[in-house]
């Protein structure tokens, strides 16, 4: 068995004393690009209004601030799992079959230029001026690079009172059951 598969099997099924010894020393490519290109967008363009523990009302979308592994991996899983109904269509934050329809890229655009605009709020009219912005292209390229089939991490964000923050906190602590 190749080392990475063995490590994966141990993390999934191994006894805890072995599991704790598996270290992830380098990110798989999509994660590397997520860290490099997407996290920066989230941290500079979204997290100030979407912080775990600080969102309220209609705003259920919350991310972890900062660049720690815990924040980066939790944010990835939060994006991966987030969806909302808009105009009676269930939209995914990361739409792997229609990458350009992902809320993540759509919500970066000024509402007038988006197919699916970010909800109307004060102080936010998109984080880029148009689709030529390199930050937008990088995010879109990342979305397009993802395998069509989403991996199942076995992390159910609905179990902790629907509080994505709390559940992802558990995930960050290594709790992929
Ligand atoms: C200036 C603050 C602000 C910024 C910046 C901002 N948002 Fe929002 N966002 C809000 C508010 C407030 C709401 C709730 C709107 C409402 O009441 O319907 C919201 C709603 C959302 C929702 C829907 C949440 C739900 O529960 O359905 C998503 C998803 C979202 N934003 C994603 C993003 C992304 C992605 C970015 C960055 C590209 C971003 N937002 C940037 C303030 C902001």
Image (cartoon, rainbow, N blue to C red):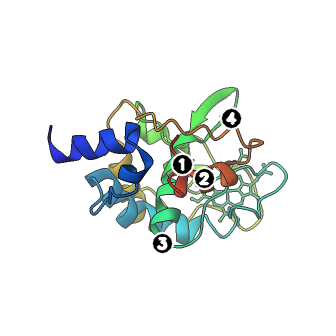
| Disc 4 within 8 angstroms of ligand 1 (CB) | no
* Residue under label 2: 170
* Quadrant of the drawing holding the N terminus: top left
Q: Which of marks 1 and 3 is nearer the N terminus?
A: 3
C-alpha gap between disc 2 and disc 3: 17 Å
Decide: few, some or many residues near mark 4? Use Cα within 10 Å; few <14, some 14-19, many ≥20. Answer: few
Residue at 41% across, 64% down:
135
Estimate the x, y position of residue 7 in percent, counting from the top left.
Answer: 27, 47
Q: In this view, does 167 lie to the left or right of 12?
A: right
> Nearer the observer, disc 4 or disc 1?
1
Q: Which of marks 4 and 2 is nearer the N terminus?
A: 4
* Residue under label 1: 175
C-alpha gap between disc 3 and disc 4: 30 Å
The quadrant holding residue 9 is top left
Q: Which of marks 4 and 1 is nearer the N terminus?
A: 4
C-alpha gap between disc 4 and disc 1: 31 Å
Q: Do the residues labelled 1 and 2 touch (CB within 8 Å)?
A: yes
> Nearer the observer, disc 1 or disc 3?
1
Label 3 residue SS: loop
* Residue under label 4: 86
| Disc 2 within 8 angstroms of ligand 1 (CB) | no
The quadrant holding residue 96 is top left
* Residue under label 3: 67
Q: Compared to 115, does 54 lie above or below?
A: below
C-alpha gap between disc 1 and disc 2: 5 Å
In this view, the residue farthest toward the top is 88
């Amino acid at each position: 068995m190749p080392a990475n598969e063995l490590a994966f099997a141990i993390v999934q099924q191994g006894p805890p004393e072995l599991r704790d010894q598996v270290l992830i020393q380098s990110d798989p490519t999509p994660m590397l690009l997520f860290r490099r290109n997407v996290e920066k967008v989230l941290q500079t363009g979204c997290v100030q209004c979407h912080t775990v523990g600080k969102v309220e009302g209609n705003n259920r979308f919350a991310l972890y601030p900062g660049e720690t592994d815990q924040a980066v991996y939790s944010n990835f899983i939060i994006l991966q799992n987030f969806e909302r109904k808009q105009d009676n269509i269930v939209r995914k934050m990361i739409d792997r079959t229609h990458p350009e329809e992902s809320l993540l890229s759509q919500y970066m655009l000024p509402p007038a230029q988006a197919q699916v605009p970010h909800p109307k709020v004060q102080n936010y009219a998109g984080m880029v001026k148009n689709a030529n912005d390199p930050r937008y292209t990088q995010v879109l390229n990342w979305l397009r690079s993802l395998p069509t089939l989403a991996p199942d991490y076995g992390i159910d964000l609905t179990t902790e009172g629907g509080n994505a923050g709390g559940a992802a906190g558990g995930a960050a602590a290594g709790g992929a059951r």
